Image (tube, helix red, strand yellow):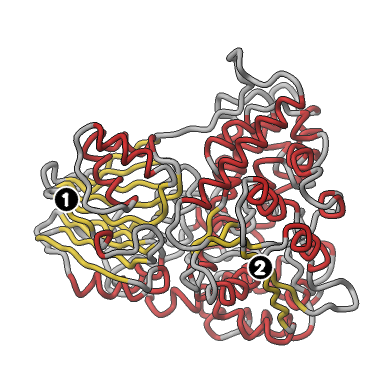
Amino acid sequence: MCGICGEIYWDGQTASSDRIVKMLTQLELRGPDDHGIWHHDHVGLGHRRLSIIDLTSAAHQPMIDQEISLVFNGCIYNYQALRTELIELGHDFQSHSDTEVIIKSYRQWGMECVSRFEGMFAFAIWDDHQQQLCLARDRFGIKPLYYAPVAGGVRFASNTQALLVSGGIDTRIDPIGLHHQFTLHGVVPAPSTLLKGIKKLEPGHWLIVNPDGQMIKKSYWQLAAKRPRDVDAPQTEQEWVDRVHESLKQAVMKRMTASDVPVGVLLSGGLDSSLIVALLAEAGVKDLHTFSIGFEDVPEEKGSEFEYSDQVVAQYQTHHQKYLVPNETVLPRLIEAVDAMSEPMFGQDAIAFYLLSEQVSKDVKVVMSGQGADEVFGGYFWYPQMAEAAENLGDNEPPVNAFAPYYFDRSHEEWLEMIAPEYHTADVTRALINDRLSEADADCYIDQVLRLDATTLIVDDPVKRVDNMTMAWSLEARVPFLDHQLVELVMSAPPELKLQDFKYLLKRIARGLVPDSVIDRPKGYFPMPALKYVRGAFYDMMKSVLTSPQARARGLFNPDYIQKLLDDPEAESSFTAIKGSKLWHAALLELWLQRHVDPYQTENCDKPSI
């Protein structure tokens, strides 16, 4: 796991090593073990390294192989098999790293090499022979890759902080990104971001920047959600359970073995992370390290799930560490978590991941996490609601009509009421989601919804949240439930196996491996009492942010709308369809802008069209 950055110009400018150094300062926590810079004329690359595979200097980056220069963030889990294949094809290797496998793969297959990679990755290749900069991102966007068109060129980086510190970035708020932000509870689907001057490469895409500045983007992978046609496809429910069980175990083991340092597990006490532990034990892994976090109880609810994680630990005898965080210490640490956000994130458990990662990073460099299981295996209460609503759609009704009432945070009309008129736009989110739900290669409505969630919505909510919060402490997080081969298999399963019960297939697999009390418990979320109830010090903080001089000067929100939320923050109308606090949404966004954007306000900078 690392941080990458770079720039290319086509108008006669030369790349600036000083600017790359500035960007690398904002990436240091993503890779504290080593750093490197390479630049030649109009192109420059920068890298911060977290050493996971091949810990020697032979894996130093930027990695140069004659006319090809590479910076890479992530992990290619099948790198050893690819390395063997490439050696048989005549390639020589100087390291045992997955980084060099990318270079040799590009040399052998060009940009089509990305379709051969199993893993999480974002990389940039400068091909001096072709005079091209090639950027690529993994299928599910597990690794981030932002880029910013600037006067006469393009810059890229693993987070927005690095781009902003480079200077000259258009920091004006993009109304399209703003509409997505407040409709999809913090999700702004690629290529948009909240800022006009910063874009992000879509998952499953590569982008080539030519010498004249022309950008060519291509999708190299699409997820189908159709029943399999081949004779070897599972037929019975038990065959599906067995096939998914084996695929999931392989996904977990890939992420355990592709490392030269120990790998732990973030054990929340839920089904997903508990099953990861069970599958590792089933595969014979010994001396596994697991980690849990909890908060103090409050009268309304418990602040931890230790009663469940303890059962898993007892069954598998893991080396376990529990961290209990006093509630009064949560709010003061919130600013740190916001500072680690490359984009504003509404999920309150970001602070939990941030605090847990702080402790875990003292013991291991790599952990596995259960993100993605809910979206792939149908774990949320709104999926059955959407499926039922879809059955009642009229013949000419758009599919978004069965989606929006159960997912959108607010209607377009309420968004217009919330946002100041100068930022108003059309109902772009509704149009985008309808287009995604209408794409081909899905057999039924719930297939369309789960595909949308797995390929788009999850990327900029739990996946990005975990990446940002773990990398803030130089900790690499791996997510086996987003193994693309596993997801392809599950997406092809019959819809009744997705809706019969929440995460029905996972529960079938887990039975006998995970304690029944963990399998049959109600679905839980990271319990964070200090940030769940919109009252006390938490309320005071939000009010202070939203009524601050910076917020008033920005004028992003309609003051009457904000005042209504402040007057009754726990009214039913103050919460979204999936129970998010509208007051928290507004306060978090304003706080993020104050921490990240205000220091780099757009003044006297070029504003290129994108």
Residue holding disc 2: 319
Give the secondary structure at mark 2.
Answer: strand
Asked if residue 524 lies left or right of residue 58, the reply is right
> What residue lies at 75% left-to-right and 46% top-to-bottom?
406
Q: Residue furthest right?
A: 299
Looking at the rendered structure, the number of numbered marks drawn on it comes to 2
> What residue lies at 61% left-to-right and 12% top-to-bottom?
231
Looking at the picture, tell me which residue is in the foreground, 340 or 246: 246
Give the secondary structure at mark 1.
Answer: strand
User: In which quadrant is the N terminus drawn?
Assistant: bottom left
2 or 1: mark nearer the eye: 2
> What residue lies at 18% left-to-right and 45% top-to-bottom?
132
Looking at the picture, tell me which residue is in the foreground, 325 or 578: 325
The answer to whether 553 is drawn above or below residue 480 in the figure is: below
The answer to whether 5 is drawn above or below residue 604 in the figure is: above
Q: Give the mark nearer the N terminus: 2 vs 1.
A: 1
Asked if residue 161 lies left or right of residue 305, the reply is left
Callout 1, which amino acid? Asp
Residue holding disc 1: 65
Give me the C-alpha separation between circle 2 and circle 1.
42 Å
Callout 2, which amino acid? His
The answer to whether 496 is drawn above or below residue 574 in the figure is: above
Question: In the rendering, at what x and y percent does residue 317 appear?
Answer: 72, 62
The answer to whether 83 is drawn above or below residue 309 in the figure is: above
Question: In the rendering, at what x and y percent does residue 255 appear?
Answer: 52, 50
